[in-house]
Image: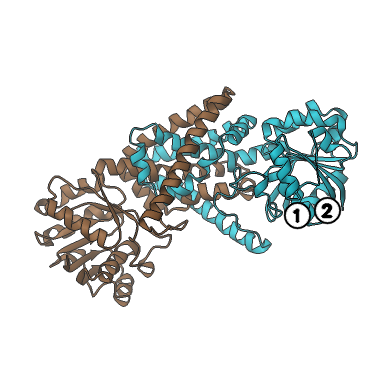
Chain colours: A brown, B cyan
Amino acid sequence: MKFKQLGLVGCGLMGASFALALQDKHLVDKVVGFSPSQATRDKALQRGVIHQAARSAAEAVQGADLVLIAVPVSHTAACLADIAPHLSADCLVMDVGSTKTDVVAAARAAMGDKLACFLPAHPIAGKAQAGVEHADASLYQDRALILTPLAHNTPAQIATATALWQAIGSRVHSMTPEAHDQTFAAVSHVPHLLAFAQVNGLLQQPQAADFLKLAGPGFRDFSRIAAGDPAIWRDIFLANAQQVLTQTTHFRIALEQLEAAITQGDAAQLQALIAQASQARSAWQLGEAASRTDQNQRLPSAGESQED
Amino acid sequence: MKFKQLGLVGCGLMGASFALALQDKHLVDKVVGFSPSQATRDKALQRGVIHQAARSAAEAVQGADLVLIAVPVSHTAACLADIAPHLSADCLVMDVGSTKTDVVAAARAAMGDKLACFLPAHPIAGKAQAGVEHADASLYQDRALILTPLAHNTPAQIATATALWQAIGSRVHSMTPEAHDQTFAAVSHVPHLLAFAQVNGLLQQPQAADFLKLAGPGFRDFSRIAAGDPAIWRDIFLANAQQVLTQTTHFRIALEQLEAAITQGDAAQLQALIAQASQARSAWQLGEAASRTDQNQRLPSAGESQED
């Protein structure tokens, strides 16, 4: 497997790291990249992320047999519409968006007969610091990569995409766009929402500053994700609104059960509810540790990802 | 400042570490300790935590000029009633409980004229692994220690207690029992409750195992405290029920504001709410880092404390 030309739309952390990883593994001959910022394009050229800077997304994808759309989720629809007329019919186009149902709807609306090129993807990777200057050829190493194939995707397309991400070190999972959005609402989007809400709940109170002076390592870890980028999380919550709200309903039921046991002074029920969570969380940790050992995974550091 | 005899009631991690710290700083001549378990008493003797094992809490405090009650919160009331008749009138008695209003009520009910000896305390310290075998003379080094003095406490008592905890490295704060319980409901108890509820909210769903397979570092940090000890957290939530439920009310208001912005598709309001949390959390982190540099604080490791 080798690609002649990668058309890279978006030369930020995610896109630039993908281009570096492909070059590192000798999977691509040439990278043509576009970013709206001249400074980003210049840095991408200087760092060898791209071999040629394009003046538009449309120009970047011309002649490409592989395209990666690595733009903010809110720009994806416009980007797909821009590039569709310029795509070769046999080009493989993937994105890196954190939500998939909305991207699929945008692709269906915007891509016309080039929809057949598009295979939605979501790498579960990132870094606390964004931008081409933090790009890293190993960003996708030992991280999960979700493909959400559509009815039009051929087995050959799916096999090529799988081999490509595996070649740069990712563990490839496949699921429907709906299952993807449900899963990440449950394990990522709602934890972020709860962390934002917990911090805002403190800030509502006049004693907030005094409270925070005594916050310790429990608060530190619980609220680490509350420092996430506001524009990224605004877009994710809006794009995945339905699944996020479904998951907060499950959360509320569980919170109300705990609160009822507290209110009623029902020690046995309260302990049982806590034990259920505690055992599941401890088992998860053990499973993670085992999977790291099995797969020689890189242990992600705290604060690594903006949107894990 | 030097004590002749520490009466240690409870030779687990917290109590044993206190005894080791005092000996390390040459602040006590003799330690007499009691734990209900023979094995714990033997280990405490072997490790030099105590010089003499007592057959009861009452025996441990006889002749002591300093007493530390380091038992599970749910045993504190019975313990105070047991020891009160055996205390010297000039003895200083402290506890290490995570909640204070309930301990004060128990002391008032149980201690009679020996109530004057009692100065409630809460060291914000711990380790993931409990037990005398993990006792550590540096457990209280660079950690916060809260005193919640009562009307009967003399300035001399408070000064002695402050000097004692400072001598073993703690940063001593003083507040009312009510302010203590409110503060820790806000920054510790409710984050734990939310983490338990989030995990239980996942477990309610038939896809829970699939969800958890794709959980990443965001979930890992957010839910780290959901692995807490069920018996410890049952007792804390029941002892501090009112403040915990007050804090979940603040949390709910903040969550509903975020959900309303999502439901209404109000991107500007949603971003503003997230930015408020994100800025406050980032500022807190910077303040913590600065305070660590200023005070040469030990950076607590993840999972260090069962009840931070």
Q: Nearer the viewer, mark 1 or mark 2?
A: 2
**Callout 1 amino acid:** Ile
The residue marked by circle 1 belongs to what chain?
Answer: B
The residue lying at 55 percent from left, 49 percent from top is: B303
Q: Is residue A302 above or below residue B224?
A: below
Q: Is residue B256 visible?
A: no
Tell which of B284 and A284 is nearer to you: A284
Which residue is drawn at the image coordinates 49% and 48% (left, top)?
B277
The location of residue A16, given as percent across then percent down, is 30, 66
Question: Looking at the picture, do discs 1 and 2 lie on one chain?
Answer: yes
Q: Which mark is residue A241?
A: none
Q: Is residue A297 above or below residue A198?
A: below
Q: Is residue A229 shown left or right of residue B84?
A: left
Q: Nearer the viewer, residue B248 or B266?
A: B248
Provide residue A14's location: percent of width, then percent of height.
Answer: 32, 61
Q: Secondary structure at mark 2?
A: loop
* Residue with the mark numbered 2: B27
Say if mark 1 contacts mark 2, CB within 8 Å.
Answer: yes
Query: Would you name the residue on which mark 1 appears?
Result: B168
